[in-house]
Image (cartoon, rainbow, N blue to C red):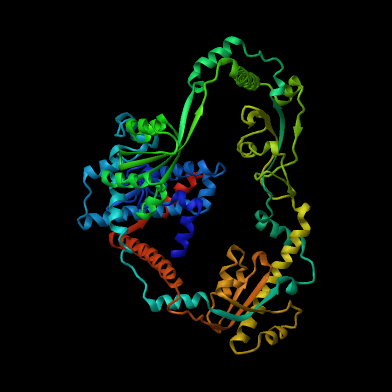
Amino acid sequence: MLTFFRNFFSSKLGIGVTMGFLVLIAVAFAGGDIANTGQFGGVAGGDRVATVGKARIDNADLERAATNAVEQLRQDDPKMTMKTFIDRGGLEQLLTNLIDLAAVREFGERHGIHIGDRLIDSEIAKIPAVQGPNGKVDDRLYQAFLNQRGISDAALRRQIAEMLVARQLLTSANIGLTVPQESALRYAGLATEQRTGSIAILPSAAFAPKAPPSEAEVAAWYAKNGKDYQLPERRTLRYVTFDDSVVKSVPAPTEAEIAARYQANKAEYAASESRRITQLVVPTEAAARAILAETATGKSLDAVAGAKGLTAASLGTLTREALSAQSSKSVADAAFAAPAGKVAGPLKGPLGWLLLRIDAVEGKPARTLDQVRGELSAQIAVEKRRTALTEFSAGIEEEFDNGAALSDVAAKLGLTLSTTQPLTADGRVFGNPQQAAPEVLARVIQTAFLMEGENQAQLAEVVPGKQFVVFDVGRIETSAPPPLAQIRQAVEVDVQLSKGAIAAKAAAQKVEAALRKGTDISAALASLGVALPPVDQVSMNRQQYQGMGQQVPPPLTVFFATQKGGVRLLGAPRNRGWYVVQVRDIVPGKVDPADPRLAGLKQNVSGEMGEEYFQQLRAAMRKEVGVKRNETALAAVRRRLLGQQN
């Protein structure tokens, strides 16, 4: 269980639906009141999916929470759908967390834990969306926040109270948890153990019948397993691109426009002075004067500071205004009055007494209108061209709004209309995944696969303000299995492999029985009388295994999960055969008790144990308050979320 939760919570989906107990759970997802009481009843399996002690979780609460969760996930993954969310276990996990949250609250109430209104108010005040310009809760923003999430003030306050109870009860689960030295040594030995054994594969093809399958067998297999041959959705895109070259006549900047731009930004062209400054902060004025006196003898500020255990920090290059905002006007005035190379101070700063060394003085002379005329003219010209291009683009969108087709607009503008090959949702060419869609379409592929129909032209920027693409979906081929006639050969192979897999499993079981009696694996395989691949002799330590990351073959995972002298069988995917995994010997690694890495291992193991304690505590709370799930109502919620009839 521990591993499942950790893996789930670390995934993008898991993060989206995990109603974390240390954050504003209610604000994140839950949108309803789960504090009402009652018994199962009503239509479509009841009006609640669970009762937790005296509390209840209504169907509508779970539906609202799931909808909000999917909407949040779409911010990171626009292709996220409710079906994907449910298929990946999101709805089930969401319900589990809502149940746990209610159970924690019920448990807290039974044991006298009370959350006051002032504490709840302080949590609400931390929500950025409800804070006004003064940083305090704005009633208007707070009401808008509630309306946007479809939740009442009372429901939100109850949910925040639940979160605070959970924080008090659950976060202490692993406080003070330590791992004994002997346990750490055992774990370390496990991490460096050496294993030897064998892995044999019994391919289904070696046991498949020679006679071809009948027509009835092929048809029945395809009818039952058609989804295994399902092709992804494919779409062709039609598109044209254009840039600012389509704008033929853009008026040149006038003298009045250039002069107005100069006046609007006159401060930018005025003379300015900035200084590169190094700062030393000391606690008292006396200490600052003593350091200043030492620098007067020729010692550097860095050397004097270092001798006293202090460090002078570079502030970089600052204007008078920037230094004044960072410290104070008097400090800035003193710094800008001192010559380069000198130390100004002592000066009273926000955190103590300051000594400022003026490392360099950098001045910028004023620039007249004549000096910047060319620069301003170029700026205005670019803006005018960009404005003209935007107006041109708006004209295209207006034509689409009036019913024009992409081909009509392309012909009118004299642009070449291109059509892609069938593409999959990842932007690859169907049947040739090494080939991708044209680069100019990279930013619109996702949008194209979200469009509901064909010939619905849209305009998008490729390079903001410079290049545009106008596109639509030319043809949509939905995801579906191809006709049997097109893949008959592949189906026939799969029928034969399914038969061979049954025989291969029976043969693997014979080998397993022989190995348990002490027979050598090569002799056991030879007794089958079938030509098989050579046995893989495995000698590997756990560190090598773990270093393989996500590329670990499944039989090797079984190999490292089997006890010494054990034999286990593993079916290969898609009826490709059966593995026989045998572990002959396990030699624990030897770890020096003084090994400095043990400290980190103990910390990791403590975290694992703490997570398990956390889960066990939640389970104990559920058991004490009592939880009843209404699977019929849950199935009805699932169907409604998927748009199916109840």
The answer to whether residue 221 of the structure is visible from this angle is yes
The answer to whether residue 646 of the structure is visible from this angle is no
Please tell me which residue lies in front, 567 or 48.
Answer: 567
Left or right of 162, for residue 243: right
Q: Position of residue 552 (x, y in %)?
A: 61, 67
Please tell me which residue lies in front, 439 or 379.
Answer: 379
**The N terminus: image quadrant:** bottom left
Q: Could you say which quadrant of the image residue 471 lies in?
A: top right
Vertical placement of 352 versus 492: above or below? above
Residue sitting farthest toward the front:
297
Q: Could you say which quadrant of the image residue 397 lies in?
A: top right
Vertical placement of 517 versus 542: above or below? below
Residue sitting farthest toward the bottom:
518
Left or right of 605, for residue 212: right
Q: Position of residue 179 (x, y in %)?
A: 37, 72
Q: Position of residue 599 (x, y in %)?
A: 41, 70
Q: At x 53% / y 13%, what residue is drawn?
A: 260
Q: At x 58% / y 64%, what residue is drawn?
A: 549
Residue sitting farthest toward the left:
112
What number of labels is visible?
0
Please tell me which residue lies in front, 629 or 268.
Answer: 268
Q: Position of residue 20 (x, y in %)?
A: 38, 52
Please tell me which residue lies in front, 236 or 301.
Answer: 301
